[in-house]
Each structure stands twice: as C-alpha cells, then as structure tokens.
Amino acid sequence: MAKRLIPLFNRVLVEKIVPPSKTNAGILLPEKSTKLNSGKVIATGPGTCSKDGKLIPVSVKEGDTVLLPEYGGSEVKLGDKEYHLYRDDDILGTLHD
Amino acid sequence: MAKRLIPLFNRVLVEKIVPPSKTNAGILLPEKSTKLNSGKVIATGPGTCSKDGKLIPVSVKEGDTVLLPEYGGSEVKLGDKEYHLYRDDDILGTLHD
Amino acid sequence: MAKRLIPLFNRVLVEKIVPPSKTNAGILLPEKSTKLNSGKVIATGPGTCSKDGKLIPVSVKEGDTVLLPEYGGSEVKLGDKEYHLYRDDDILGTLHD
Amino acid sequence: MAKRLIPLFNRVLVEKIVPPSKTNAGILLPEKSTKLNSGKVIATGPGTCSKDGKLIPVSVKEGDTVLLPEYGGSEVKLGDKEYHLYRDDDILGTLHD
Amino acid sequence: MAKRLIPLFNRVLVEKIVPPSKTNAGILLPEKSTKLNSGKVIATGPGTCSKDGKLIPVSVKEGDTVLLPEYGGSEVKLGDKEYHLYRDDDILGTLHD
Amino acid sequence: MAKRLIPLFNRVLVEKIVPPSKTNAGILLPEKSTKLNSGKVIATGPGTCSKDGKLIPVSVKEGDTVLLPEYGGSEVKLGDKEYHLYRDDDILGTLHD
Amino acid sequence: MAKRLIPLFNRVLVEKIVPPSKTNAGILLPEKSTKLNSGKVIATGPGTCSKDGKLIPVSVKEGDTVLLPEYGGSEVKLGDKEYHLYRDDDILGTLHD
C-alpha cells in the first residue's frame, strides 16, 4: 500500500500532468503543443519560519494546478506513482481555466 | 483553450513586444533600430514577504510597458502564445510615451 | 556497549529503512520497487536559534518515518549499527500509512 | 519618437559624457587626459525596500554628474540615444566643479 | 610548560579520543570497529553575538564527549599535546553512555 | 580645471602617499624601507544604511592618514592627479605619528 | 620614526611571537616543538556595528597573547618592525600561562 507523504517546511508535493502525446485517434501531436510543464498539488508543508520566528505559509494549496519550472524538483515514488517535490518559491504560478 | 496564469511571489508575466523587422512596404529595418527589449505586463504575483513577514507588493502592474533585461526570464507557453516570467527586480524600468 | 548520541542544533539522527531486496521466498525484487529512501528518526537536536535569539524547534520528532534526500547526510556508527545525521531542513517530509 | 524610461528600484539611468577626443582644431588628444568615466543622471528609480519594509531612496538625483565604475551597467537604447542603467550603489560618487 | 587556551567566540577546544587499535593482548582490531570520531571538550568560547547583539552561548560544555565531523577543525599544539578547535555548529552531537 | 568628487555611500577618496624612492642626494633606497602602503583621505561618503535604515557613518574622516590594503580600490583621475576609491571597511587603519 | 597604527572596525594588530629555533647554546630545536602560532596584541579597532547599529566590541585587548590561524592576516610594516592584522573572529583564542 502506498504511503502518504506530508512535506516539511515550504515543500510542495506535485503530481505532474502528462499531456497527451497523441490524439484519441492515435495521431502523434507535435512536441510544441505539449510543452506546458504543469502539475497538481497533492500536499504542502506548513511553511517556513521568517527570521523572527513567524510562520510564512506555503503560497499554493492542495488541488491547485501549478506551472512548474523546467528544471529542479526531487522525484519521489510513493507506491507505484511518481511525484515531484518543489520548494514553493520554485513554483512559477497557478493555472486557471 | 488557453489557461490563465497567476504568477507566484514577485513574478511578472510579460508578453514581449516584437518590433517590426521590416516596414509596411517590406523594406528590412537594420537590427540597431529594433533593439529595445520591451514587453507588456499581463499578470503579476502578490509580492514577496520581507524578513519580518510584511508583504512587499510587486513594483509593476498589469498593462505596464516594461524594459526587460537582455538575459533571463523563463519562457512560458499558454495556448499558442508565448510569454516570459521575470522576477520584478529583474525588470529594468517602465516605458512611457 | 553502544553510546547514545544527542544531536546538536537542528540535526536529526536517522536509521535508514532498508527495503527488502528479495521476497521471503528468495525471489529478487526489481530495484524500482525498492527505491523509496526513508528512515526512522532516532533522536533530534533542540533546534537552532533564529537571528533574534529565539529557538526554532526541529520539525520532526523521535519515531517519525521520514523521506530522505537522495544525497547528503553524514554516516555515524554507534556500536555496530549505522545511522545518518541530517539537518532537519534537508529532510523532505514525513511518511504516514 | 523616443520613449521615456522610469527605472525600477534603485536603478539610475545615466547618459555617459563622451569626452572630446580631439581639440576644436582637430588635434588628437592623448587617451590619458580623457579617461574620467562620468555621466549625467537622466532618471532614477524610487529606491529599494530595507529588510523591514522601509524605502531607502536613491542616493543620486536627476541632473547629477556622476563618476561611473569602469565595468558594469546595462546599455539601453531609447530612440536613437544610448543610455546606461546602474544600481545606485555601483555609482562611485558625484562630480562637482 | 604548556599554556592554557581559552577559545574565542563559539570555538570549542577538543581532545580527540584515540580508540585502541589493538587489544591489550596485542591483537590488531579491524578499522571498522574504531571508526567513531569522538573527543572530549577541554574548553569553550563564550559564544557568538546574534544580529541584534545578544550572546548565543556555546551548545557544548567542558567535559562533554562529542561526535566530531569527519573533516574540519584546526589542529592546535599546546605543550606536547595535540588538540583540535571546532566551531560549535560543526560538532555533530554529544555522546552518552 | 579639476572636478571635485564627493563619494557615495561608505566610499573614501584617498590620495596615495608615494614614499621617496631615493634620498635628496639621489641615492636609491631599498624597496623594503618604502613598503608601507598609506594615503591621505581627501573626501568620504555619508556612510551606508543599516538593515533597519539607520545611517552608519564612515569610520575615517578627511585629512586622516590611512593604511591601505595591498590590493583593491578603484583608480580615479581628477584633473591630472590620481586618486583611489576604497570602501571604508577595506581600509586597514589610521596612522598617527 | 615608526608610525602608530590604530586598526579600523574589528581588526587587531598583532606582533607574532617568534619561538627560539635554537637553544642559548646554539643547538637547533626540532620544528615540532616550535609550532605554536601565537602573537601579542598591540592594538585593536573599536569593533563592528551589528545589523541594527549597535557596536560589537573586539573580543581581545591590548597585551593579550593570542593563538593565530595558520593562514590569513595581512602583513604590515611600521618602522622596521613587522606586524600582522587580523579580523578578531579569525583569532582562535587567548593563551594563558
């Protein structure tokens, strides 16, 4: 059974959204149209302490769709699913329809 | 459909202004006269926290025309349009007519 | 007789959980299914001082199961058992069933 | 028409003073006598925030003649004129007759 | 006659505990069983000042048995005895029976 | 006519004291006896701001004879005289008869 | 005539104690017995300012015998005597009989 991970500090556990690389009919999509590097926030840490000891909460929350940086993040495997951990200030922004 | 991006922290989403590289009549313009690296601010983050936890707002706002540094910024593709993300302190200034 | 170690500052003494590399019946498990780098917290330091002298306690506690970074940590041998010391902000998160 | 640039933070827009490299009569001046790297302040940013959120204003003002460091500064072209942007703490001093 | 050293700031004077490399009967011990890098605290400095001028005392005290990092520390010779100086935040922890 | 330079921040304008390399009678002095790298303070900046916005004044004043570091400082030419600019915390000390 | 140096900030002027390399009778001493790198404090600066502008005094005083680091310190020649300048936090400790 997969374990549940609660990140520490300002870390954010993200499940990357894998864009479809071919259409339902099986036609391969050009790489360009699949480039957006986004993910879903699965869990967040409590935040980090400022220099005078106040907690600065994490700036994204569970369920957010986020834009991820091209590089960085640590791969984490829980059960048979693959996730990534990011510091919240490495996450570029939140995506909305 | 293109998603909307709300940047985190002091990040600024910019659409670069591509200067015309030839005149309406089709005459190529010399590179020198097209060099100004500017863009339009599409969206900004809420700002960053100072060391004692106060929010320092972003120093540009949506709609501003900004002068961009020669290097830096992360390319972001939303729908079929290309944008760039900058930290607000990497933006050199605002441009006015 | 093994000595007991009380870590200083925000250091955390961790005993790594070695995943079984073969089943009870002796069948070798593929490396992939054993990849999670986790450990049990054996002891923690008191925490570090913030810039204005307040103690920031360590964010994990004895008995926690933690997710460890791929690199880092100092190997420590107490008696004939092997442990690792991590700064608490290098620990990625806590694992729960 | 040239755009007007308002620098951000503690940036200073400077127009470099090009020393005459020959006399009115056309005699070339030796490089030594032309070495002073100075400029005129065209515009300044509002300043930067200190760690506790107070604004620290820029230490030079429009119209000041300033001594510039040998290296550094970003070239900016507005209309057909060339300017340079410096952080105010890179400017060495102000020049007075 | 050997001089006495009072360390400055958060420095700690340590006398390394050299583990026996052979038994009383003269049998060589394998290197593994002698690996623990520990020492006895001989003297400590008063501590360092925090950013707002408060003294942060050293986190170990005279007589403590400490676990030392594999690298670092400055060798000091007082009389014909050899000691090592460490910053207290380089010391990994205290050892107890 | 030479311009007057008022340094910014904690910069100090220094005129180096060139030690006589031969006696009045023309006898060359050995390099050793001329090694002291000193100068006279011509002008100082107002100082720098501390993190909470208080001005920290420059620690030397006009007319002081100062001991300069072997390396560092920016050469500045005003009129036909050569000066050097130093950050006040790069100046080693003041010299007194 | 030799000038007197008053160090700036937390600098400390030290006269190194050169250990006798041979006995009174002219017998060369082995290098090992002369290794302690110590000196006498000749003068100290007033100290450095903390981030909020309070003066942190120098932690050694004139006349102290100090243990010096193996590397570092700037050589200074005053008159025909050779001294060394150290930042007070580079000095390892004070030596007492």
Image (spheres, coloured by chain):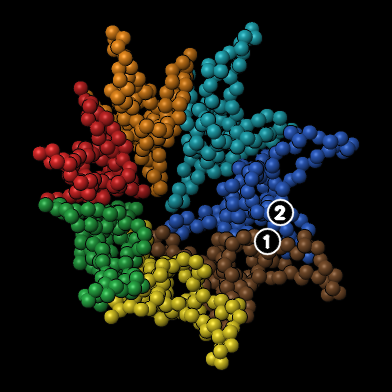
Chain colours: A yellow, B brown, C green, D blue, E red, F cyan, G orange
Q: Can residue E55 be seen in this view?
A: no
Where does residue A49 sit, x and y in percent of width and height? 35, 62
Measured Cα–Cα span from mark 2 to mark 1: 10 Å
Residue C80: mark: none
Which residue corresponds to mark 2? D83
Q: Which of E60 and A31 is in front in this view?
A: A31
| Residue A8 in the figure: left or right of residue E94 | right
Please name the amino acid that badge 2 sits on: Tyr
> Does E50 sit left or right of B40 as displayed?
left
Dot 2: few (<14), some (14–19), or many (≥20) neighbours within 10 Å?
some
Q: Which chain carries label 1?
A: D
- Residue at the spot x=54%, y=64% of the render? B87
G15 and G11: which is toward the camera: G15
Residue F63: image location, x then y, percent: 55, 28
Camera-near label (2 vs 1) is 2
Give the image location of residue F40, x and y in percent. Answer: 56, 27
- In-front residue for pair A59/E82: E82
Q: Which amino acid does label 1 sit on?
A: Leu
Residue at the spot of label 1: D5
Residue B38 place in picture, x, y as percent: 67, 66
* Rendered residue at 86%/74% (across/down): B25
Q: Quadrant of the N terminus of chain E?
A: top left
Q: Quick check: B68 above or below D26?
A: below
Earlier sequence position, callout 2 versus callout 1: 1
Decide: is A34 above or below D38: below
Say whether marks 2 and 1 touch (CB < 8 Å). Answer: yes
